[in-house]
């Protein structure tokens, strides 16, 4: 599945649109390094952030991400899978802070309202050098 994003369709007419919105948002933030535009274009004014390391609210979260990206200018996010179910979208991605790093497996869960990202949860797990089972995380 190299360089291809698996789009897994769930219930609801808006699934494809929601998946595209979330992918556009993540690419703008992490690959284009433009969280201000990503939040202005794709985030609901009543945005709720559940990541315990990031502040709540759209403006505060965008600012937080801007600072994070400034520390890691070579950061890249490769989205591997996208799932949608109604107003929720889940992505499974590979984030590398530097090109030579193993990186982390990232799962983002978002809830959309009125076509905009209204709520966000995420989990991250570092890619180990030697997994116990020999399987990849992607």
Image (cartoon, rainbow, N blue to C red):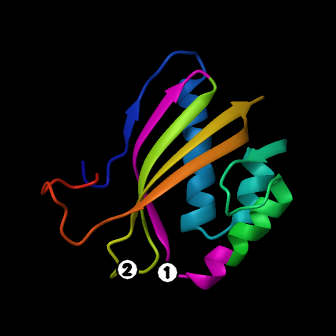
Q: Which residues are magenta?
A: 68-86
Mark 1 or 2, nearer chain start: 1
* Identity of the residue drawn at 51% across and 29% down: 84
Q: Residues within 10 Å of mark 1 (few under 14, many from 20)?
A: some
> Quadrant of residue 99 in the image?
bottom left
Q: Is residue 11 visible?
A: yes
* Identity of the residue drawn at 62% across and 75% down: 69
Q: Which residue is mark 2?
A: 99
4 is higher (above) or lower (below) than 134: above
Tag 2, which secondary structure?
Answer: loop
Q: Nearer the viewer, residue 70 or 28?
A: 70
Disc 1, disc 2: CB below 8 Å? yes
The x, y position of residue 117, in whole percent, is 71, 40
> Quadrant of residue 119 in the image?
top right
Q: Nearer the viewer, residue 21 or 112?
A: 112
The x, y position of residue 58, in whole percent, is 81, 54
> Quadrant of residue 44 in the image?
top right
Q: Residues within 10 Å of mark 2 (few under 14, many from 20)?
A: few
Q: Which residue is mark 1?
A: 74
The x, y position of residue 89, in whole percent, is 55, 35
60 is higher (above) or lower (below) than 44: below
* Identity of the residue drawn at 28% across and 54% down: 137
Q: CA distance from mark 1 to mark 2?
A: 7 Å
Give yes or no for residue 99 being in the magenta stretch.
Answer: no
57 is higher (above) or lower (below) than 101: above
> On the picture, is 89 further left or further right than 100?
right
């Amino acid at each position: 599945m190299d360089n291809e994003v698996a789009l897994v369709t769930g219930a609801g007419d808006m699934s494809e649109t929601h998946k595209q919105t979330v992918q556009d948002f993540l690419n703008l933030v992490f690959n284009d390094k433009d969280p201000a535009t990503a939040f202005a274009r794709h985030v609901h004014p009543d945005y709720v952030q559940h990541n315990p390391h990031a502040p709540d609210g759209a403006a505060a979260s965008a600012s937080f991400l801007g600072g994070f990206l400034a520390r890691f200018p070579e950061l890249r996010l490769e989205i591997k899978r996208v799932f949608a179910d109604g107003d929720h979208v889940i992505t499974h991605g590979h984030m590398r802070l530097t090109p030579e790093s193993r990186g982390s497996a990232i799962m983002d869960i978002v809830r959309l309202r009125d076509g905009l990202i209204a709520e966000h949860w995420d989990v991250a797990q570092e890619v180990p050098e030697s997994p116990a089972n020999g399987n990849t995380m992607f």
